[in-house]
Amino acid sequence: MTGNAQICKLSGPLQLDGGSLLEGVEIAYAAYGELAADRSNAILVCHALTGDQYVADTHPITGKPGWWERMVGPGKPIDTNRYHVICANVIGSCMGSTGPASIASDGSPYAMRFPVITIRDMVRGLVGLLDMMGIERLHAVVGGSMGGMQALSLAANWPERTARVLAVATTARHSAQNIAFHEVGRQAIMADPNWRQGDYYGEDAQPDAGLAVARMAAHITYLSEDGLTGKFGRRLQDRPDGTKGAKSFGFDADFQVESYLRYQGSGFTKRFDANSYLYITRAMDYFDLAEEHGGRLADAFAGSEARFCLVSFDSDWLYPTAESRHVVHALNAAGAPVSFVELSAPHGHDSFLLEHEALDRVVRGFLDG
């Protein structure tokens, strides 16, 4: 499916949580389906850490299908025959929205001069895009993982802007373990000699080795032990000389799981920016909806009139079911209408991106109901 990919320049600067004012903000987005005359059928889909606006389009760099193409499209659970679906690249990222690689007012890339941002700042950019599109109230905001954080942040900080909130495999705040994994990734990037304190744009060598390691470490958290064992176990790679499943007695990728992680890491460097990875992971680590609202999560949703649906997966140890239940309890305390389901899936956190008929039914039923 082909979306209407374009860039919108916001009408004014964004006041960021860190105190900075970000001028000349551009938001890259794709839109699918017709917007109703009364603008009542818009659904905002928010992407995860390494996602982008190409939710249902072929990715222009990798050539791969859109990251949620199985979910968004004509007749699909997020049905573009019924809804006008918008997916935007968040600020701080690297697929067209203003981020570290963007050109600052002095004509050079921001690099590490880009201000540190928060999830709420990302949503400020999305709200600015909706304002430019004349969409005052969404039919729904939908997101998984970091996209779910954005969905919850929109509901908490702009309660009048959406009628429904669907948050999948997500959390209301990052745990110490989440922060720890992100710090390993950031340190891998910053230890790469080609990082150059973030000033690597235009150089022949990029901090690809560090970014690849960061991706490898993060990718482990997206999977489950059962999933990894079922897919790879302790099976050995076939050697380049044709030897079947033999140890090299060296440090090549002897195990299939090692080869898989290296493939994931090297492929990631072709489509993502190392500085963006630093900024977005820091934004996720800072995310704490309760802290933003006086320390009580229920107070974050006190003004919301939206209907909520939370979905978790039993094999997700990155954002386990307990995190979703915590949000559900807070919504109950705030008097907000909420439904919740834990789905069984073997694939860990990434289950929300993969084929899952029960998730399809939940999404379709919540959006169309």
Image (tube, rainbow, N blue to C red):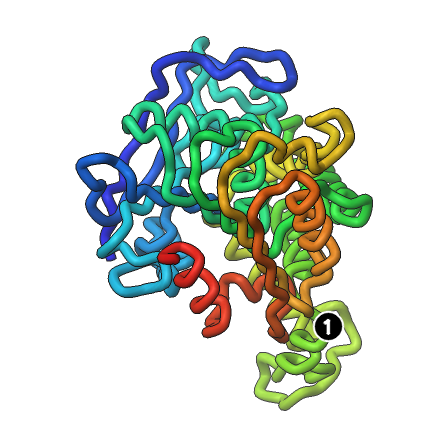
Residue 162 picture location, percent across and down? 43, 37
Rendered position, 168 above or below 200: below
Horizontally, is 179 left or right of 103 in the view?
A: right
- Is residue 194 visible to us here? no
* Residue extending furthest toward the right: 176
Please report the residue visible at 78 percent of the width from the left and 45 percent of the height from the top: 175
Of 300 and 149, the residue lying toward us:
300
Rendered position, 300 above or below 324: above
Horizontally, is 156 left or right of 79 in the view?
A: right
Three-letter amino acid code at the position of disc 1: Glu
Quadrant, the C terminus:
bottom left
* Residue extending furthest toward the bottom: 244
Please name the residue that numbered disc 1 is placed on: 225
Q: In the figure, residue 152 lies in which quadrant?
A: top right
Residue 65 picture location, percent across and down? 36, 60
Residue 246 picture location, percent across and down? 71, 86
Residue 140 picture location, percent across and down? 41, 45
Secondary-structure class at tag 1: helix
Give the total of numbered labels: 1
Rendered position, 253 above or below 206: below
Horizontally, is 220 left or right of 82 in the view?
A: right
* Residue extending furthest toward the top: 106
Please report the residue visible at 51 percent of the width from the left and 31 percent of the height from the top: 159
**Number of other residues with Cα within 10 Å of mark 1, as a class: few under 14, some 14 to 19, many 20 or more:** some
Please report the residue visible at 74 percent of the width from the left and 78 percent of the height from the top: 248
Q: In the figure, residue 283 lies in which quadrant?
A: top right
Of 323 and 273, the residue lying toward us:
323
